Image: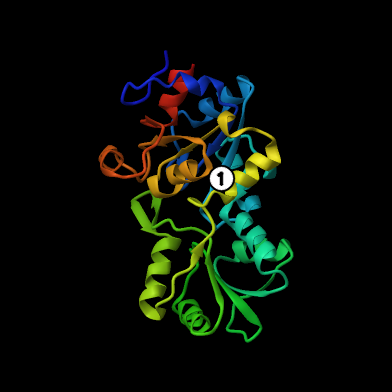
Amino acid sequence: MITDYKNRPAEDLRGKKLWLLDMDGTIYNEDRIFDGTIDFLAQIREQGGRYLFITNNSSKSVSDYVKKVNAMGIDAGAGDFYTSGQATAMYIHENYPGRTVYCMGTRSLVRELQESGLKVVTEVSDEASVVLIGFDTENTSEKIRNTCIMLGRDVAYLATNPDLVCPVSFGFVPDCGSMSIMLKNATGKEPFFIGKPQPIMVDCVLKNTGYSRQEAVIVGDRLYTDIATGKNAGVDTICVLSGEATLQDIEEGEVKPTYIFRDVKEIFEKLH
């Protein structure tokens, strides 16, 4: 009998075929892969399942992520990822077709949006009627100023993800959600967030892969994004304690995961 970190029955995990994995804080921290990750991923495939990485971190494009995880020894290609950047591009195409987008984001995000067919600018422009912010690891005071100018206009306002922090080797740094709070303090405006916990990413992945909601499970380290996504999408969840969420957060929070594990290594050991 499989049990989770709190000794609750978790035998249902043997029937999961699609493992939707968060990345930062779940399988690695910056450039350090967590112990047990490679074994866990190999186990999923050996047992006839599939893993797919869904990440709110919009600072990197899919091609960037492929290079990053391949360098860590993880077997993955472009089809094994779905990012908040990709979900945002799809959302804009569907809801604001033909609009010019002003983006405060990394060069990788801008390039990915442009490659999807969107017209994107990074300077103040009268043409832009959509403002988008992402997790901008290349941010500058000039970018912030330009974004505030754009938000002073009659524009649609979107953000790739609501994460407050991103885990790094020494702790955490402000993520897109924190950047949106900073901009709200200056402009009074709040964005509509595209990534987790919106069910958009999971719905797209299930549609593209053909798996049912009962066959899928989300593994992540954040209650308000990863675990809340599972609740919103009707998919079981595992919260790992290797990133942002602590056991106290889970016990005191309103959003509850289906299962709790110490890390992906413990999942591997329990399913072995």
Where disc 1 sits, the SS reads strand
Reading the image, the residue beneath label 1 is 54
Up the image or down, 13 lies above or below 65; here it is: above
Place residue 206 in its image quadrant. Answer: top right
Residue 29 can be seen, yes or no: no
Task: Give the residue at the far top of this rendering.
Answer: 1
Up the image or down, 128 lies above or below 165; here it is: below
Q: How many numbered circles does the render carry?
A: 1
Q: Specify few, some or many for label 1: CA neighbours under 10 Å numbering under 14, 14-19, or 20 or more.
A: many
Residue 268 can be seen, yes or no: yes
Q: Position of residue 166 (x, y in %)?
A: 41, 53
Residue at 46% from the left image edge and 44% from the top image edge? 226
The way the protein has been coloured in the rendering is rainbow
Q: Position of residue 150 (x, y in %)?
A: 53, 82
Residue at 62% from the left image edge and 78% from the top image edge? 129
Residue at 68% from the left image edge and 42% from the top image edge? 207
Q: Position of residue 160 (x, y in %)?
A: 53, 60
Q: Quadrant of the N terminus?
A: top left
Task: Give the residue at the far bottom of this rendering.
Answer: 126
Query: Toward the viewer: 171 or 58?
Result: 58
Q: Along the horizontal axis of the image, is 56 left or right of 204?
A: left
Q: Which amino acid type is marked by label 1?
A: Ile
Up the image or down, 216 lies above or below 61; here it is: above
Q: Position of residue 96 (x, y in %)?
A: 66, 69
Up the image or down, 235 lies above or below 114; here it is: above
